[in-house]
Every structure is written in structure tokens, then in C-alpha cells.
Image (cartoon, helix red, strand yellow):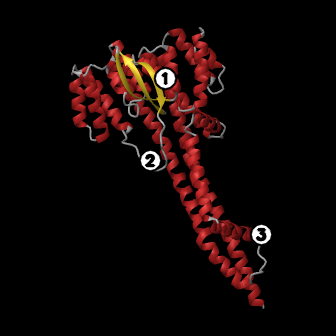
């Protein structure tokens, strides 16, 4: 998400601030939904790099607890100002404490809760703000907050599952890379000296051994250049994938990677179903719900398909029609959606679709986790075996030649 600064008017008064959105158009739409009429919107250029630290972070767990407790207090009839003050005192996270304090001050100044949340997009995203706004408008804020807490929990559970599955291969891969560089820089040169001492500078070595020695010599001779090239490549790649074009190409590539594309698609479908259902149940208009949902999916390619579907809905078609032709939305989704449109229970049916795909994600990730360990062991074993064969074979051969002479 990109941050945009804006100058605008609200209720005849000049206001300014910062909003986070995927594009300038989405930033304008977000402001309009908050009854803010933008006069100018400018993208804030972030000087982010690998060494940039944020001002703070709010964990999903903290946001879930805050949302549930706020819902409980509102349903119990506790005034909003008092509820926020109580929650602020209970919050251990200093950054979140400051955010709640700012929200409370805005509420005291007469600002709607959704607008106050909208000023902190790094904590309360566009979905959160839109649902709170719908809850305030419909007088069902406590119910909406309960739905939001459940949705944040579901999203956090999926992210945790993925991180857990990736932890082992990430550690093993990191150790493997470090071991490879350690061997190339420190061990291979010593072995090369042993081979030279045994067979002389003109000793005939197996091709795979010679390749290993050449790689080691090249890396040691050009270590600084390699580090600079790798560093700049990572830096520019990181910056590129933050641009709309770069992000789209990355997401398009990921959707073509076997196994990974299956996981990404199922996660996107689960997010679509749960987010769209929550927004519809909150009374958000279909087109607005589609726009917000697209930004929550997490994949630009699938988001573009939703935008195309939204155009057809705007022309009078039911959402199930364009989704039935989609490359990434299975027929079961469009069929279930069609049933929901006929019965008027889109939110109920899509929640079931979300539950189904979340279970599918769990099954796929568990299956991959079970396969990762033996695959990584085979890869490590193969690498160690190749290095051992490249080193020990010539040493044994040269030792025999020395012995025979």
C-alpha cells in the first residue's frame, strides 16, 4: 500500500492528512467514502530501504482484542469515549496506545469513529474503516466489530500457518547458502593447496573438481564486486516490486509457479469470500464492496479480474456471471454466489465458501510441510556429496600416484 498526502474540505472546513491506498484513485475513493472532498492528492515518496525502521507495529492479536472489547463495551451501553479511554489504559503496546489516544481525541472533537480510524491506515485498513462506517450508518456497530474481530483472527491464522510452514525451509536454505560460501572462501582454497602439493601445479584433476576450484577462485577474486551486485540487485528488486507494474508482474509470475499458485489462489478466494460477505452484511453497496475486497485479496492479477467483473456488474449483470468466466475463480464460487443472489443470502453462502477454502489452505500447507523436510535433506545431502566427491576423489588418486612413485 502507498501513502498519499491530501488537502481537502469536510463540512466546509479545510482539512489535510495522509491516507494509505493501492492507487491514487483508491485514495480519492476512500476519502469520498469518509465525506472528505479532496482538492489535491500527492503520493508520499518513501525512502524505504533494508535499513528503514517503522515507527511501530500493532499485532493482529492486539487488534482482535481491541475490536472484541470495544464491541462488548458498546453493546453494554458504555459511551464510546469512555470505552476508548478504558481500552487505552489496558493496552500494553505503546504505539497502539498512542493510536487509541489519537482516535479518542478525534471522537471528542466530533469526528465519526470510521473517520478517526481512517487517519491510521497502518493499523486500521480500508476494509476495517469501511465496515465501521457501514456499522455506524446502520446502527449495528457492535455486530460489525464482532465480524471484524473474527475476520482479523482468520487472516492472522492463515498468515501464521504460512509462516510456520516456511520457517524450516528458510532456516535450512539460509544455513545451506552460508555453508556454501564458507566452503568456497575458506575450505576449498586449502584443499586446492593440498592437491597442488600432492600432484604439482600441472596435476590433472576431474572436470567437476576443476569446476569447483574455478568457482572458488572466481568468488574469492571478485568477492567485493559480487557483494555489491547482489546488494544492488536485491535493493532495486525490492523497490521495483513495490511499484504497481512490478507488483503485478511478480504476482503474475507467482500464479504460474506449480504448487505455490494453488496456495495463493485458495488464499485469495478465501479472502474474497469472507471480506465480500462481511461488507455485504454490513450494508455496503456491491460496487464499493468489490473495490474494497479487491484490495484485500493480496494479488494484483486476481484484483484486476474483480475490477473487470465490477464493470460488468455496473452494466447490470449479476456478479456470478463474470466470475463464471474467470480463470482464477472456480465454478463452485460462481455457482454458490448465484444461489446467494437468488435467495438474498450472499453473505451466509460466501462465509461457507470462505470456510471451505481456508480448510483447503490448511490441508495444502500441511501436505507441503510434510514434504519439505525430506526434500531439503536430499538437496543438502546431494550438495555435500558432490563437494566430498570433488575433493576426496582427487586426493585419494594423487596419494596413490605419490605412493607408487
Task: Determine which residue is flagged by label 2.
Answer: 52
**Residue appearing at x 65%, y 77% in the figure:** 191
**Residue 12 image-quadrant placement:** top left
Mark 1 or mark 2, earlier in chain? 2
| Residue 93 in view here | no
Q: Vertically, is 13 above or below 382?
A: above
Position in image of residue 206 (x %, y %): 77, 72
**Residue 301 image-quadrant placement:** top right
Task: Determine which residue is flagged by label 1.
Answer: 292
| Residue 34 in view here | yes
Position in image of residue 354 (x %, y %): 50, 26
Element assignment for label 3: helix
Position in image of residue 123 (x %, y %): 38, 33
Report crowding for label 1: few under 14, some 14 to 19, many 20 or more residues within 10 A (C-alpha): many
Q: Vertically, is 292 above or below 192?
A: above
Q: Disc 1 to disc 2, how far (Cα)?
A: 29 Å
Q: Disc 3 to disc 2, how far (Cα)?
A: 46 Å
Decide: marks 3, 2 in contact (CB < 8 A)? no
Which one is in front in this view, the residue at disc 1 or the one at disc 3? 1
Element assignment for label 2: loop
Task: Determine which residue is flagged by label 3.
Answer: 207
Amino acid at each position: 500500500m502507498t501513502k498519499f498526502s491530501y488537502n481537502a474540505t469536510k463540512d466546509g472546513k479545510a482539512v489535510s492528512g495522509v491516507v494509505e491506498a493501492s492507487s491514487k484513485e483508491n485514495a480519492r475513493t476512500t476519502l469520498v467514502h469518509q465525506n472528505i472532498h479532496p482538492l489535491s492528492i500527492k503520493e508520499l515518496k518513501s525512502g524505504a530501504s533494508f535499513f528503514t525502521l517503522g515507527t511501530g507495529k500493532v499485532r493482529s492479536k492486539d487488534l482482535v482484542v481491541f475490536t472484541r472489547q470495544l464491541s462488548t463495551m458498546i453493546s453494554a451501553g458504555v459511551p464510546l469515549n469512555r470505552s476508548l479511554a478504558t481500552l487505552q489504559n489496558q493496552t500494553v503496546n505503546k504505539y497502539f496506545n498512542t493510536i487509541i489516544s489519537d482516535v479518542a481525541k478525534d471522537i471528542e472533537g466530533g469526528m465519526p469513529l470510521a473517520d478517526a480510524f481512517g487517519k491510521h491506515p497502518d493499523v486500521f485498513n480500508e476494509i476495517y474503516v469501511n465496515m465501521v462506517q457501514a456499522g455506524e450508518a446502520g446502527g449495528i456497530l457492535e455486530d460489525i466489530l464482532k465480524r471484524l474481530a473474527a475476520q482479523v483472527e482468520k487472516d492472522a491464522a492463515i498468515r501464521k500457518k504460512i509462516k510456520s510452514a516456511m520457517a524450516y525451509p528458510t532456516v535450512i536454505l539460509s544455513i545451506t547458502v552460508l555453508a556454501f560460501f564458507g566452503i568456497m572462501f575458506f575450505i576449498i582454497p586449502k584443499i586446492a593447496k593440498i592437491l597442488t602439493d600432492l600432484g604439482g601445479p600441472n596435476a590433472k584433476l576431474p572436470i567437476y573438481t576443476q569446476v569447483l576450484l574455478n568457482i572458488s577462485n572466481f568468488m574469492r577474486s571478485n568477492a567485493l564486486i559480487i557483494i555489491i551486485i547482489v546488494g544492488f540487485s536485491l535493493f532495486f528488486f525490492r523497490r521495483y516490486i513495490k511499484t504497481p507494474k512490478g507488483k503485478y508482474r511478480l504476482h503474475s509470475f507467482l500464479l504460474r509457479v506449480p504448487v505455490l499458485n494453488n496456495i495463493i489462489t485458495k488464499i485469495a478466494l478465501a479472502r474474497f469470500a469472507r471480506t465480500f460477505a462481511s461488507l455485504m452484511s454490513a450494508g455496503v453497496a456491491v460496487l464499493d464492496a468489490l473495490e474494497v475486497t479487491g484490495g484485500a485479496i493480496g494479488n494484483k492479477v486476481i484484483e484486476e479480474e474483480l475490477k473487470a467483473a465490477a464493470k460488468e456488474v455496473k452494466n447490470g449483470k449479476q456478479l456470478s456471471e463474470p466470475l463464471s468466466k474467470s480463470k482464477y475463480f472456480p465454478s463452485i464460487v460462481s455457482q454458490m454466489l448465484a444461489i446467494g443472489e437468488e435467495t438474498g443470502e450472499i453473505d451466509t453462502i460466501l462465509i461457507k465458501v470462505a470456510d471451505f477454502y481456508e480448510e483447503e489452505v490448511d490441508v495444502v500447507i500441511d501436505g507441503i510441510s510434510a514434504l519439505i523436510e525430506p526434500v531439503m535433506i536430499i538437496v543438502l545431502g546431494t550438495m555435500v556429496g558432490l563437494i566430498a566427491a570433488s575433493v576426496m576423489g582427487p586426493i585419494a588418486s594423487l596419494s596413490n600416484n605419490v605412493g607408487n612413485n
